[in-house]
Image (cartoon, rainbow, N blue to C red):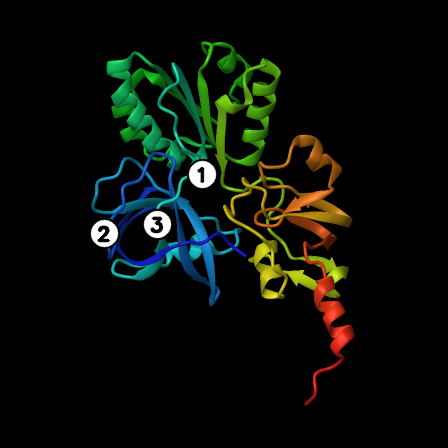
Amino acid sequence: MKANTTWTNAVIESFHDVTPTVREFSLRPTGGVQRHEPGSHLQLQLLVHGKPQTRCYSLVGEPDGQTLRIAVKRLDDGLGGSRAMWQLAVGDRLQVSEPQNHFPLDFNAPAYLLVAGGIGITPLLGMAQALARRSAGTGQSLRMLYGARSETELAFLPQLRASLGAALHTAVATPIDFAAEIAALPTGAQMYVCGPVPMLDAVRRAWEASGRPPADLRYETFGNSGRFAPQAFRVQIPRHALDITVPADCSLLDALESAGVQTISDCKRGECGLCAMDVLAVDGEIDHRDVFLSVDEKRGNQRICACVSRVVGSITLDSSYRPDPAQDNLCAITGPRAR
């Protein structure tokens, strides 16, 4: 079960590679482009291994009113969505949602620290451009930290340098001292972060230790813990008398829905927590790839976010399904229906 989404046709107008592993696509919806704010994303419907699946991608840069731009990092050991995107050609059509925003930018803070890790730059590029334009007239402080494993993977670097100048600081294969960066922020400053789960966990720990208001830290993830490559695992759901295998190229959420287990979901990025399920037992290790559960909750292994998290081994889950007592009573009163 998903939140209501409006879909429209879009054509791939162009694409180009911004790094050896990141490709930017320009999409032109047939009904025109809706205005969107920094931090917005699109849902796309793709055929992955011949099966229809939905993927979410952040909108890149400020809107031009003509096209919607996304950037996709090719993950050869991922679930197949990025490989499917990289196989598309100019002129191909696909279904896209209207722009949605679970990562909105508040323009009223006195200072901002933006932190991107790898492909996490995609939602932050538009934020950086919008804030840089405003800071000249408002006096708001702006600083951006951009980390990557290699210089070649610093996507959109020319655009960032043009907008931020000396306010942009890159860290290539170098840890960032988040505690020091947070300590240097003035009162009321906001921090926006997007990157892999380990980086987000480190930022959350440093922010909590600083004593700053939790609401001033805002983040988005792309659901990758960096701990294990996707692999098949076994799932048992006693309430449904189910014993299924989740393939390496399929999410737990998609596997459950294919098996007829209705699971509430929305963001599909491990942020909203709607798809979190109770864990009854685990034989192996849970690879928590969400940012919804706290560090202590992840250690406790009592819940799992089905949209992004995985398992090495096997797991037993409880679903939200419960029999309808009213329906059972009705059957008991009326008996079996006559044929």
Give me the residue at 34% from left, 29% from top. 127
N-terminal of the pair, mark 3 or mark 2, is 2
Tell me whether circle 1 and circle 2 mark residues in contact (CB < 8 Å): no
Label 2 element class: loop
On screen, residue 26 versus residue 270, left or right, reads left
The image quarter in which residue 235 lies: bottom right
The one of 174 and 271 positioned closer to us in this rendering = 271
Q: Which residue is mark 3?
A: 98
Q: For the residue carrying disc 3, how many other residues have a C-alpha within 10 Å: few (<14), some (14-19), or many (20+)?
A: some
Q: Amino acid at mark 1?
A: His
N-terminal of the pair, mark 1 or mark 2, is 2
Measured as percent of width and height from the top left, residue 303 is found at 69, 43
Q: What is the distance, in whole Å, between disc 1 and disc 3 at their CAs?
A: 13 Å
The one of 90 and 150 positioned closer to us in this rendering = 90
Query: Where is 136 relative to 50, above or below?
Result: above
Q: Which residue is mark 2?
A: 32
Q: For the residue carrying disc 1, how many other residues have a C-alpha within 10 Å: few (<14), some (14-19), or many (20+)?
A: few
Label 1 element class: loop
Q: Is residue 241 visible?
A: yes
Query: Where is 243 relative to 278, above or below?
Result: below
Measured as percent of width and height from the top left, residue 273 is found at 59, 42
Q: What is the distance, in whole Å, between disc 3 and disc 2 at their CAs?
A: 10 Å
Label 3 element class: loop
Measured as percent of width and height from the top left, residue 21 is found at 40, 44
Q: Amino acid at mark 2?
A: Gly
- Which part of the image, by quadrant, shows the C terminus? bottom right
On screen, residue 151 versus residue 273, left or right, reads left
Q: Which mark is residue 102?
A: 1
